[in-house]
Amino acid sequence: MYSAEYLSTYPYFQNTLESVPLSAVHDSLTGLISRKYILEFIRDLIERLVPFTLGIIDLDNFKTVNDHYGHATGDGVLAQLGQALRDCVGRDGLAGRFGGDELLLVYFKSNDYNHIHDYYASLFSGGSLLRRSYTVNGHRLFITGTVGCAACPEDARDFDTLFAKVDKALYRGKSKGRNCFIIYVEGKHGHLEIPKLAKRSLYDTLREMDEAFDQDGETEEKLRWAFVPIRENLRMSTLMYLDGAGALRDVISGQDLGVTGHVDYLMENGLYAPYNLSECYDANRGLAMALVKAGYESALFFRLEGKEKGPRCLILCPEPHTMHIWQDEERCAAFFLARLLNDAEK
């Protein structure tokens, strides 16, 4: 936990601790600053015209940790992660718990874009905070997170505007597949709207896929039309397939990307969803290299059963240069697309 001595180096906490016990300032689980006091601290910084960068860290799919391993394990992860975040921030800022599995990071060292980029990149590498495993109650859990951040006063000079821009950056990161950080840049993100960044319901996506696939046309045309709702609603960028001869073909461009072999034996229940294509190198180096060369860091593979010609394995790719954590709705969409294709060829 933060010491009273360290907190008192900030005028807001020096005044607050005169009337509030240190235990009330801390979040009892994570050891970070509790929601009430971290938010008041941020308001005070803005009023004092102190430059800083504010980030929201949203842990990816953390509900599954509580659902599968119990809340005691989830709490243990949050406690360890809180300590790791305090270590990462050091004396260059403060971290607080915003609520649930969302954390706030107030960083003072520099508002320079390149510096902030390097700093947040360091949180995702080397096992410092995210993209690392935490061991709790005998369970080894790999934890990732999505981060949005913005700078004061460069991006905003008041509390509400600053949080709105941080929130917009966070949703942009989620729409890119999570497991990444987004630094707010007005020219890139100013026009974005959170409702449009939020994914549409899975029902809407499947219904639109079904309607698109009903159109007349050859197999690749049907796949191309049915992929449109996946691309627009689930933020995928590319659909490919492996045919019976092991040749890789891009459905969108119609380009034949060459013979790369098979990945069928890697799949459990017809599905293979690595978050990092480096996992594929030993299994199918040619395919992994073809995807990496095209700019992809992850891909979802779905086997098509009982087919001798045409597509044997569908491959969905997120935006290039995105290490994607595959969501249940994306797996469902791939399964539904495979069913549409199989049913059409019976």
Image: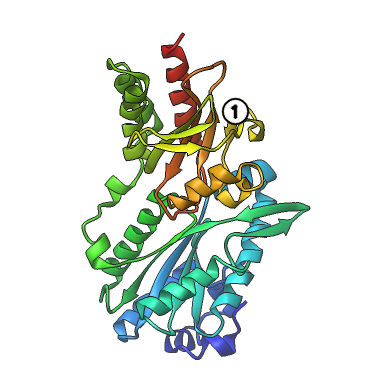
x, y percent for residue 47: 30, 82
Coloured how?
rainbow
Q: Secondary structure at mark 1?
A: loop
The residue carrying mark 1 is 270
Residue placed at 35% from the left, 55% from the top? 172
**Quadrant of the image containing the N terminus:** bottom right
224 to the left or right of 75: left
Check the image and name the residue furthest to the top: 346
Residue placed at 57% from the left, 71% from the top? 85
Comparing 312 with 303, the one in front is: 312
Count residues near mark 1 (Cα–Cα under 10 Å), then give few for <14, some for 14-19, many for 20+.
some
x, y percent for residue 100: 52, 56
Q: Is residue 328 above or below residue 114?
A: above
Mark 1 residue type: Gly
285 to the left or right of 316: right
x, y percent for residue 162: 30, 69
x, y percent for residue 325: 52, 48
> In the figure, residue 42 lies in which quadrant?
bottom left
> In the figure, residue 50 lies in which quadrant?
bottom left
Q: Is residue 81 above or below residue 140?
A: below
Check the image and name the residue furthest to the right: 138
